[in-house]
Amino acid sequence: MKNSNLAVIGYGNMAQAIVRALYSPNTLKKLNEKNISLNITVSDSDETKLTHCELNVKKTTDNALAVSNADFVLLAVKPQTAPSLLENLKLNDKTIISIMAGISIATLKKLTHSTKIVRVMPNLNARVFSSYNAYVCNEITSDEKAFVSLLLDSFGTSAEVKEEKLDAITGLTGSSPAFVFMMLKAFADEAVNCGFSPSEARNMAIAAVAGSAKLVEESTAELNSLIDSVCSKGGTTIEGVKYLCENNFENIVKTAVEKSINRSKELSGNK
């Protein structure tokens, strides 16, 4: 059985979701079928995060120790802190997997002195194994790519893209859960105003969004057609849709995505 050693630098929300997914029964089964034994070491300066990790992984606050025997290194730290955290680490012989927003492959090469780079843009839906994971590879072998694909598929759906698309994907899929959560909150808050309990309001909001997403997924109809199918002439829905249109709802959402994309470009120096 082949040993694959993964070091995770930074153990925030995204890293925690990814590591949990790698320990899911489905992923462990796939690893076993491919004759891979995965060993994970997580490192974070915040010992509280490590203490709360109940998974059977090695834990340390020493990044150098974490990467010493690693084949793959997952960088899950804030982009602004990366230069100082990475400058003294020996990473030149490692396959680097970065989920840091806005940090280009060229910059990652300089920071890590490695040529084997995978740049990934996941999102928080990794917590429920439903993240859209766009990624770009640089100078990795077919075996390494197969491992990366397995890792990414463990917490969602993976898609290889060109690097110039990643800034847009950061705003479209990386940031979008927050926008959806805000819509859910608005729906639930109004339900509470109408006299429903918070739990009832939450359940209604979840059912509305989850059901609508499922309908879109399983339908071949255009989105505009689906909108029209809910809006009976003189009915209730059309009044709400008119209000949203009059107040530029779609443009507000588009602008929010654009702001996120522009911030990603600023981080990567692609203004």
Image: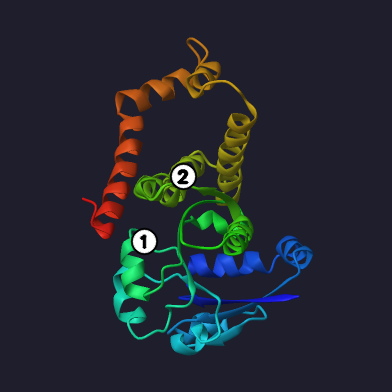
Marked residue nearer the N-terminal end (2 or 1): 1
In the visual, does 199 lie left or right of 29?
left
Residue 253, relative to residue 136: is it above or below? Answer: above
- Could you tell me if residue 103 is visible in this image? no
In-front residue for pair 201/109 = 109
* Amino acid type shown at disc 1: Ile
Classed neighbour count for the residue bearing mark 1: other residues with Cα under 10 Å, few (<14), some (14–19), many (≥20) = many
Give how far apart the Cα atoms at labels 2 and 1 are.
Answer: 30 Å
Residue beneath the point at 31% across and 54% down: 264
Classed neighbour count for the residue bearing mark 2: other residues with Cα under 10 Å, few (<14), some (14–19), many (≥20) = few
In-front residue for pair 133/226 = 133
- The residue tagged 1 is 105
Residue beneath the point at 34% across and 49% down: 167
- The residue tagged 2 is 180
Residue 208, relative to residue 201: is it above or below? Answer: above
* Amino acid type shown at disc 2: Val
- Could you tell me if residue 221 is visible in this image? yes
Rendering coords of residue 202 (x, y %): 56, 47
In the visual, does 184 lie left or right of 259?
right
Q: Quadrant of the N terminus?
A: bottom right
- State if disc 1 and disc 2 touch (CB < 8 Å): no
Q: Residue furthest top?
A: 233
